[in-house]
Amino acid sequence: MSARSITDEQGADVRAADTGRRAGTDAGTGVRADAGTDVRPDAGTDVRPDAGTNAGTGVGRLYGVGLGPGDPSLMTVRAVRVIAEADVIAYHSARHGRSIARSIAAEHLRADHIEEPLVYPVTTGTTDHPGGYQGAMDEFYAESAARLAAHLDAGRTVAVLAEGDPLFYGSYMHMHKRLAARYPTEVIPGVTSVSAAAARLGTPLVEGEEVLTVLPGTLPEEELTARLASADSAVVMKLGRTFPAVRRAVERAGRLADARYVERATMSGERTGALADTDPESVPYFSVAVLPSRVAARAAAGSAEEPAERISGEASGQTAGGATGAVTGAVTGAFTGAVTGAVTGEATGDVVVVGTGPAGPLWLTPETRGALAAAQDLVGYTTYLDRVPVRPGQRRHGSDNKVESERAEFALDLARRGRRVAVVSGGDPGVFAMATAVLEAASADPYRDVPVRVLPGVTAANAAAARVGAPLGHDYAVLSLSDRLKPWEVIAERLHAAAGADLVLALYNPGSASRTWQVGKARELLLEHRAPDTPVVLGRDVGGPEESVRIVRLADLDPAQVDMRTILLVGSSRTVTARRGEDRDETVVWTPRRYPESPESPGGTVSPGNPGS
């Protein structure tokens, strides 16, 4: 394309070419899906304080006019009035000259309207513009804004037509950004294709406290997969050539079974169906993939089931309002037998063991978020269940922290009934947590055929280490100081071995109300191998409201300051502490990745050990 002479996008010395041109054909914007995503609280209006009548001012008024999803009867009354009163009607167009935007508004156009087709220089093809695609588009938007500015400077009212809503993936926004600060402007909101698609499917997009995620199909496939996996419900715009990648992302996110496809919602040629059954070769740009609300699906799946308290056998598996209640007694059999005899050959469900990380939702992975949202039943220690939002249609089965085997069998029994079950664990489920108990039970009859997955989570050691720097930067060992499931003699032997190998140590379960002496014994043992000034990180409730992270010398480690919510990171002989910050009031800890043969200190003036160095 040839470059036009534009000195300034703000309106100085711009040429208005072809301002009096009329378009007698259906020219316009039909190739871009300008009804889209990015739901903004302020989307739809941008009425400036000085926006009023232009009588006597010599300055025109700019309108961004949302036309809705395609059916002309879905245009707002305000949109119709603005079009009828405008002097200039502008719309974007591909080179083929057909315009969906213009065709929607056609019956409201007057013979004396000045029409400004804004013809894209490139859509899906290539360009020889020196700036590539983006350069060509930037130049095009600048030229288009200049043409509209010439009309506005002449005192004409300009209405820019936009499918859907003008500020919802709309091309109008490029005009808005260039012109709204200079001219009185109003945006007329329109029905988006998201709302139209949901209406045509006749299914809720979101219920209760669900969150709707709207995504462009042009995102990289991995990014799409991650976002879809974590979404309650979602709409993917801009399909067409992106459809194969979008379908793969939906399938990898585990949502293909309930995903729907909508093409040209409310327009001629509308088509709906299952996304899995859609032919990729038939998908146009004006189509969307819809992952609807899970609430209705969960309710339907559970409608024929017994009430939660009868399934679980618990006195208070659910309290009023959906909060979990602890299973009192915590005796063997609190779960076992709860669904005895209930397996009737129904379709097998599955069990996914998830880690919530050390604290709340900020520590969840997208995959874990998706698994928690998809589950029909949540099973776990009540402290960890309380980290998971209550969702309509889900059943929550809480217990105390001493019935891991029973909890695992209960979850597997639910899956044998055809339920989708998430076993909720803190941190990473495979690190001193529920994955072992579930897999142990699942490897024996009668649960061998129940599908089980384990999803990773942020473990306490990594969370605490990140708060102070990188103490786990080199080789390290992970041990539990709890002697509830193994004798102290085994723990002591492993501490000796790991300390003698000069490994950084991550010590889980260091103490509790009933275990008060293990930390002191461990300190004595470690001092046989480590210098007194070896740094020890005490991380308590990392990520939670009572977070406390401190660095002390090994010799100063006080067992009274350690409980079950604390993890200890004990440095090696090479672990370094250093003061940072303008006032040197920040202490960081790291263990060098290089392990030199000489005993000299790494890092020049920075010394290993000694938290006060």
Image (spheres, rainbow, N blue to C red):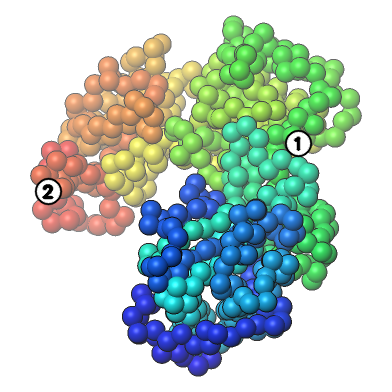
Residue 488 position by quadrant: top left
Q: Is residue 351 above or below residue 258?
A: above
Quarter of the image with the C terminus is top left
In the structure shown, which secondary structural element does the residue marked by tag 1 occupy?
Answer: helix
Give percent across and percent down for residue 288.
Answer: 70, 58
**Residue 423, position as x, y percentages in the image:** 62, 30
The Cα atoms of the two marked residues, 2 and 1, are separated by 56 Å
Q: Residue furthest bottom?
A: 2
- 259 and 245: which one is in front? 259
Residue type marked 1: Ala
Q: Residues within 10 Å of mark 1 (few under 14, many from 20)?
A: some
Query: Which residue, as the protein is rendered here, is positioned at the far front?
Result: 56
Q: Residue at x 43, y 64 (%)?
A: 54
- Given residues 517 and 411, the one toward you in this image is 411
**Front disc: 2 or 1:** 1
Which badge, 2 or 1, comes first in the chain's sequence?
A: 1
The residue most toward the right is: 345
Q: Could you tell me if residue 250 is visible in this image?
A: no
Residue labelled with disc 2: 582
- Above or below, comparing residue 403 to residue 603 in the picture: above
At horizontal 78% and vertical 61% (from top left) the residue drawn is 267
What secondary structure is marked by label 2?
loop
Which sits in the foreground, 592 or 294? 294
Is residue 316 positioned above or below 64 on the image? above
Residue at the location (49% across, 18% down)?
A: 484
- Please tell me in which quadrant of the rendered image residue 230 appears: top right
Q: Amino acid at mark 2?
A: Glu
Compared across the picture, whether 334 is left or right of 601 comes to right
Residue receiving disc 1: 297
